């Protein structure tokens, strides 16, 4: 099941990861997963296709490659997997506009990434694999996405059905599994994850351990404005989200990285989140909600609860390289 990790068995706890993977493979049998189990019956007669990235859109195939009947089958499949949170994609000429314009985030971080050719990359909380696909043109050795959500896995498998790239892997793992790796990854993406967890410093320490010496972390988070090194700790919800713990200022995020003993800490971007980047679309329609529903309608500088409206902060940092 994890044969692709066998060559690296000295740098990961393969028995523990194999056991976990076997257990989580049974999640698809849980109640409420029928639509995911049934979705792929529509794709059984589809074959892998050429793909490209154009203007930030991951484009699979061309419009003239499918009959009208097969195009209808594909659209039924894609709509069964609503909501699509990350994108944009295009399937055989059919535009799939997701809730998030993830291409905008990629455009911010891409100039800070070195050459990814031959590298091993981890995307924590990878969702459907949009950012993984963005890495592929540089030919990494491995791009592993982890997200303990069957819905995300089903969307990823839709991409992989057509892209069929052996370097791209998805596992139903969470941040809790990062300690099973040591001196393994050249680059780790942690984007939109850290504020969902109780222990941000421990998470960064785990990431540092999993990186090779000199390896890079791209840390991206929701944040609040302010010059002080503080974090908002909401009593209840933030922007209608229950699972939010520490929402940092930019300086607080920088200090987290320093406290976790990272070096070469650089600010990539500090951007106020707008409805250009996060909004409802045909593939994330009502009754799902998005940024416009999370802000105070009378004062968009505040969330619906009265907290400061969200920024997005991106930083780059490195594990200290070995010295001779």
Image: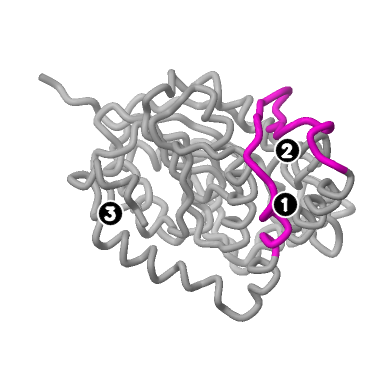
Binning the other alpha carbons within 10 Å of mark 3 as few (below 14), some (14 to 19) or many (20 upward) gives some
Tell me what residue is drawn at x 73 percent, y 33 percent: 61
Q: Is residue 46 left or right of residue 29?
A: right
| Image position, residue 62 (x, y; %) | 78, 30
Tell me what residue is drawn at x 77 percent, y 39 percent: 274
Name the foreground residue: 311 vs 10.
Answer: 10
| Image position, residue 144 (x, y; %) | 44, 43
Residue indicated by mark 2: 89
Q: Is residue 267 left or right of residue 162?
A: left
Q: Which mark is residue 180?
A: 3
Could you tell me if residue 252 is visible in this image? no
27 to 54, vertically: above or below: below
- The magenta segment is 39-67
Given contact means CB atoms under 8 Å apart, are the residues at marks 1 and 3 in contact?
no
Instruction: Give the mark toward the camera: 3 or 2.
Output: 2
Q: Quadrant of residue 98?
A: top right
- Is 42 part of what is drawn in magenta? yes
Could you tell me if residue 21 is visible in this image? yes
Residue indicated by mark 1: 84
């Amino acid at each position: 099941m994890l044969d692709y990790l066998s060559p690296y068995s000295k740098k990961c706890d393969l028995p523990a990861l194999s056991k976990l993977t076997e257990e989580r493979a049974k999640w698809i049998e849980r109640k409420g997963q029928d639509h995911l189990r049934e979705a792929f019956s529509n794709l059984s007669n589809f074959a892998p296709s050429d793909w490209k990235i154009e203007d930030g859109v991951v484009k699979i195939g061309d419009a003239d490659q499918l009959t009208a009947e097969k195009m209808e089958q594909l659209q039924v499949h894609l709509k069964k997997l609503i909501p699509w949170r990350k994108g944009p994609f295009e399937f055989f000429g059919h535009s799939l506009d997701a809730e998030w314009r993830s291409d905008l985030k990629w455009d911010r971080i891409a100039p800070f990434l070195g050459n990814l050719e031959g590298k091993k990359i981890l995307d924590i909380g990878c969702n459907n694999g949009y950012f993984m696909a963005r890495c592929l043109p540089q030919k990494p050795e491995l791009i592993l996405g982890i997200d303990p959500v069957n819905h995300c896995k089903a969307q990823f498998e839709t991409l992989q059905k057509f892209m069929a790239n052996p370097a791209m892997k998805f596992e139903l793992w969470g941040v809790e599994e990062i300690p099973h790796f040591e001196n393994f990854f050249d680059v780790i993406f942690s984007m939109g994850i850290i504020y969902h967890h109780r222990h941000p410093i421990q998470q960064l320490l785990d990431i540092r351990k999993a990186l090779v010496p000199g390896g890079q972390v791209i840390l991206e988070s929701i944040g609040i404005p302010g010059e002080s090194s503080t974090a908002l700790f909401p009593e209840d919800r933030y922007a209608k989200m229950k699972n939010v713990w520490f929402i940092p200022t930019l300086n607080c995020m920088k200090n987290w990285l320093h406290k976790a003993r990272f070096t070469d800490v650089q600010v990539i971007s500090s951007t106020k989140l707008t409805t250009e980047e996060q909004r409802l679309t045909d593939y994330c329609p009502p009754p799902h909600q998005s940024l416009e529903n999370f802000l105070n309608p009378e004062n968009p500088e505040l969330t619906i609860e009265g907290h400061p409206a969200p920024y997005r902060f991106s930083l780059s940092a490195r594990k200290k390289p070995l010295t001779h």
